Amino acid sequence: MNAGVWASTGPGFEEAPIRLLCFAHAGGGPLFYRPWRDPLLPEIGVLAAVLPGRETRVRERPCERLDELLPPLFDALRPYADRPFALFGHSLGAIVAYEMARLFSESGTGPPLRLFVSGRRAPHLPARHAPRHTLTDGDFLGLLTQLGGTPPEILRQPGMAELFLPSLRADFRMNETYDPAPERPPLFCPVTALTGDADPEVTRDDIAAWSAVTCRDFRMRTFDGDHFYLKSAPPPVVSAIRTDLGLLDPAPVGGAP
């Protein structure tokens, strides 16, 4: 299958019986999830979404609102749901994954096996910060340095920073202007919410509140680390994903429920 411009896969993806569709943080893309491929194979094939303005699509105009992004993203990824699949989203990607779970559930495809959300407060909770997409370039770069999710070589080089700042600002705006409709019915799929124990962006209560979005099984897992505790596919995170998808894993499962 040709992954197309919206999706990035790797060797073994086609043969895997379960697919994990992944959505990255602000400014992130397939490179963030590439280390996940081999540890999750052969049972789980990883697909990372490629949004406009990121990586191979860096020259494209980025989306600034979720309602602008979701329709074409869903149309592009729906063909990959031709076998059991799950969704995983980190930070901004958590709300993208959540809204994609709703679209899949309302379509003829049906709900995912499980929704994994990471590093973001539940959608119905108020923002913890004043809007940051309007910060000056200097303050915005300082914020990105503090969060640690953007490669330092990009932040240190003015030319590179100028290239990536528009898409990063667009992602922050998408996250900060997201306003889910009130009184939405809960999802009919299980949910796992994950967090780092030293994440400055969210609290345990913020993560636990994801339990309200589902009428099925809910699990909360906490790992050692900051906002990017899941970088480079640490074994406890990989083991938790495999376990929560019903696969036996010989490695100990990290994260306290």
Image: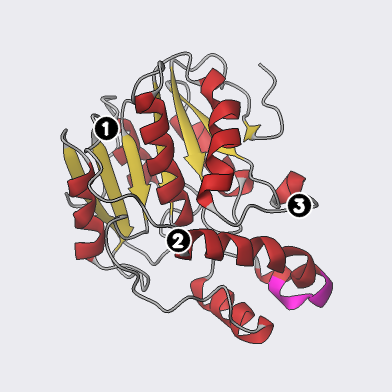
Instruction: Report the amino acid beneath label 3.
Output: Val
Q: Nearer the viewer, mark 2 or mark 3?
A: 3
Quadrant in which residue 143 is drawn: bottom right
Q: In the structure shown, which secondary structural element does the residue marked by tag 3 occupy? A: loop
| 76 to the left or right of 43 | right
Q: Position of residue 122 (x, y in %)?
A: 29, 56
- Reply above or below: 82 against 101: above
Of the numbered discs 2 and 3, the one sitting upstream in the chain is: 3
- Reply above or below: 55 against 43: below
Crowd class of label 1 (few under 14; some 14 to 19; many from 20; radius 10 Å): some
View extreme (front): residue: 182
105, 21: nearer the viewer: 105
In the image, is residue 156 part of the stretch drawn in magenta?
yes
**Residue of label 3:** 58
59, 108: nearer the viewer: 108
Which disc, if any, is residue 228? Answer: 2
Q: In the structure shown, which secondary structural element does the residue marked by tag 2 occupy? A: loop
Region of the chain picked out in magenta, as a range? 155-159
